[in-house]
Image (cartoon, rainbow, N blue to C red):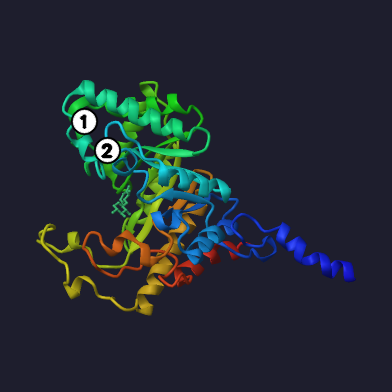
C-alpha cells in the first residue's frame, strides 16, 4: 500500500505527455472526439508558436491535433529578400508540431498576397522561373519529411473561375501552376500537395478548381488535395453547395480539407446594396453590433450552423482529411479586423477568455450522441 502511494506521483510524471497534460486527465476534446474522422486543426499566431501564453498553448494541445501557421510561413516573412530566408519562426512552428505529435501543414508557397515587396517587382519570365525554383525548393526541402502537407498555390482563381491576374500569371502565364506543383513534388515527393482558395462552394469557382486540378494532373503534376478555406457566414454558403463541392473535388481523386474555417456573425459590407466596398466603415456602430457580448439568440444560431456543417463533414468523413479553424479563440480572429478594422467578431468555438462556446458544445454533441 505504502509502496503504491509512493509510486503514484512518479507514474503520473512519467505519463505526462509533451503538452504537459496528464494522459489520465485527458477527457473529451475536439481531437479525441473526432479522432476516427479527420484531423482537427487550428491556425497559430507567432505568439502561440513561441509559447508566450501557457493557457492558450495548453488549450491548443488539449483540443487540436493539426496546426497551420497563420502568417509566419508566408513569403514576406520567410523570404524577405532575394538572397535571404528567415526560418527562425517556421523552425519553431515545426518543432512545436513535432513535440506535440501534431499534423503539420505548410501555408503557403505561392500566393499573390503578403508577398515580399521584392517579389512583386519581378518583371520577366526568366527571373520569375528562377525565383519559383529557388523559393519552392528551398522552403519545401527545409522541412522535407517533417511537414505533412503544403498549400502549394493559394487563391489563384477569380470568382468566375478564371485565373487571377498576379505577378505569377503576368510573367509566366498559366503554366506557373503546373510548375509550382512539380517543383514542390520534386523537393519532397512524399508530402501532400494542396490547392487552397476561398468561396470554393460557388458553382463558377468550383468549376475553375476542377479545371485546375485536371490541368495539373494532365501535365504530369502531383496534386493531392483541394483546401476550401471556409470563411463562411451564418446563412451562406448553403449546405447543399458545400456538399456538391466535397463530392466534386473528391470525384477528381483528391482529398478535401477545410483549411481556415470560421463563421462571421457580423454584417457584411458586400451585402449592403449599393455600398462601395472601399468606403470606410471603421467606427460605424451598425457594422459592429456586438462590441461587448454576443446575444444568446446569435450564439444559438452560430451553434446550429456549426452543428449543421459538422454533420455534413461527418457524412463525408471518408473524403475529408482535415478541418482547421482559422485561429484558436475569438479574441485572436483576423475577422476582428477584416473586412472592417476594429470590430468584435465571434467566429470560432472558443471565446476570448478561452472558454468553450455553445458552438463548441454543439460540435462535440454530434459525436457524443453517437456513442
Ligand atoms: C490572414 C491572417 O489571418 C491575418 O492575420 C493577416 O493579416 C492576413 O491574412 N486567406 C488565407 C490566409 O489564405 O492566409 C489569410 O490569413 C486569410 C484569408
286 with respect to 35 (left or right): left
Residue 45, position as x, y percentages in the image = 39, 55
Q: Assign the N terminus to one quadrant of the image.
A: bottom right
Q: Residue at x 26, y 45 (%)?
A: 114
User: In the structure shown, which secondary structural element does the residue marked by tag 1 occupy?
Assistant: helix
Seen from the viewer's position, the closer of residues 254 and 285 is 285
User: In the structure shown, which secondary structural element does the residue marked by tag 2 occupy?
Assistant: loop
Residue 266, position as x, y percentages in the image = 27, 68
Residue 347 lies in what quarter of the image? bottom left
Seen from the viewer's position, the closer of residues 205 and 238 is 205
Whether residue 296 appears in this view of the structure is yes
Seen from the viewer's position, the closer of residues 15 and 276 is 15
Q: Which residue is mark 1?
A: 169
Q: Are marks 1 and 2 in contact (CB under 8 Å)?
A: yes
Q: Residue at x 42, y 64 (%)?
A: 329
- On residue 156, the disc is 2
Residue 249 lies in what quarter of the image? top left
Q: Assign the C terminus to one quadrant of the image.
A: bottom right
Whether residue 178 appears in this view of the structure is no
How crowded pointer 1 is (Cα within 10 Å; few <14, some 14-19, many 20+) is rated as some
Q: Residue at x 51, y 64 (%)?
A: 54
Residue 68, position as x, y percentages in the image = 43, 48
Earlier in the chain: of badge 1 and badge 2, it is 2
Amino acid at each position: 500500500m505504502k509502496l503504491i502511494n509512493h509510486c503514484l506521483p512518479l507514474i503520473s510524471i512519467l505519463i505526462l505527455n509533451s503538452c504537459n497534460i496528464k494522459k489520465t486527465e485527458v477527457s473529451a476534446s475536439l481531437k479525441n472526439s473526432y479522432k476516427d474522422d479527420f484531423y482537427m486543426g487550428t491556425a497559430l499566431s507567432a505568439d502561440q508558436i513561441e509559447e508566450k501564453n501557457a493557457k492558450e498553448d495548453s488549450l491548443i494541445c488539449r483540443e487540436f491535433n493539426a496546426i497551420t501557421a497563420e502568417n509566419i510561413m508566408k513569403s514576406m516573412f520567410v523570404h524577405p529578400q532575394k538572397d535571404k530566408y528567415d526560418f527562425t519562426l517556421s523552425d519553431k512552428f515545426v518543432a512545436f508540431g513535432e513535440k506535440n505529435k501534431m499534423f503539420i501543414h505548410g501555408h503557403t508557397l505561392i500566393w499573390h498576397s503578403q508577398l515580399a515587396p521584392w517579389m512583386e517587382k519581378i518583371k520577366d519570365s526568366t527571373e520569375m522561373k528562377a525565383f519559383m525554383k529557388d523559393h519552392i525548393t528551398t522552403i519545401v526541402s527545409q522541412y522535407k519529411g517533417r511537414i505533412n502537407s503544403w498549400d502549394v498555390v493559394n487563391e489563384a482563381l477569380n470568382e468566375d473561375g478564371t485565373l487571377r491576374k498576379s505577378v505569377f500569371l503576368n510573367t509566366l502565364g498559366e503554366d506557373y501552376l503546373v510548375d509550382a506543383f512539380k517543383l514542390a513534388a520534386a523537393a519532397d515527393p512524399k508530402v501532400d500537395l494542396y490547392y487552397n482558395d476561398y468561396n470554393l462552394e460557388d458553382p463558377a469557382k468550383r468549376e475553375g478548381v476542377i479545371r485546375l486540378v485536371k490541368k495539373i494532373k494532365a501535365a504530369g503534376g502531383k496534386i493531392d488535395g483541394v483546401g476550401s478555406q471556409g470563411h463562411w457566414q451564418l446563412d451562406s454558403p448553403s449546405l447543399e453547395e458545400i456538399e456538391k463541392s466535397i463530392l466534386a473535388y473528391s470525384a477528381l481523386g483528391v482529398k478535401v480539407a477545410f483549411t481556415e474555417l470560421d463563421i462571421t456573425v457580423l454584417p457584411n459590407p458586400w451585402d449592403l446594396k449599393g455600398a462601395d466596398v472601399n468606403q470606410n466603415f471603421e467606427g460605424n456602430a451598425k457594422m459592429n453590433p456586438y462590441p461587448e457580448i454576443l446575444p444568446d439568440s446569435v450564439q444559438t444560431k452560430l451553434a446550429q450552423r456549426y452543428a449543421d456543417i459538422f454533420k455534413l463533414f461527418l457524412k463525408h468523413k471518408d473524403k475529408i482529411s482535415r478541418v482547421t479553424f482559422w485561429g484558436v479563440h475569438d479574441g485572436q480572429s483576423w475577422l476582428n479586423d477584416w473586412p472592417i478594422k476594429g470590430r468584435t467578431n465571434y467566429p470560432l468555438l472558443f471565446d476570448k477568455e478561452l472558454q468553450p462556446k455553445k458552438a463548441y458544445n454543439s460540435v462535440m454533441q454530434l459525436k457524443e450522441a453517437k456513442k
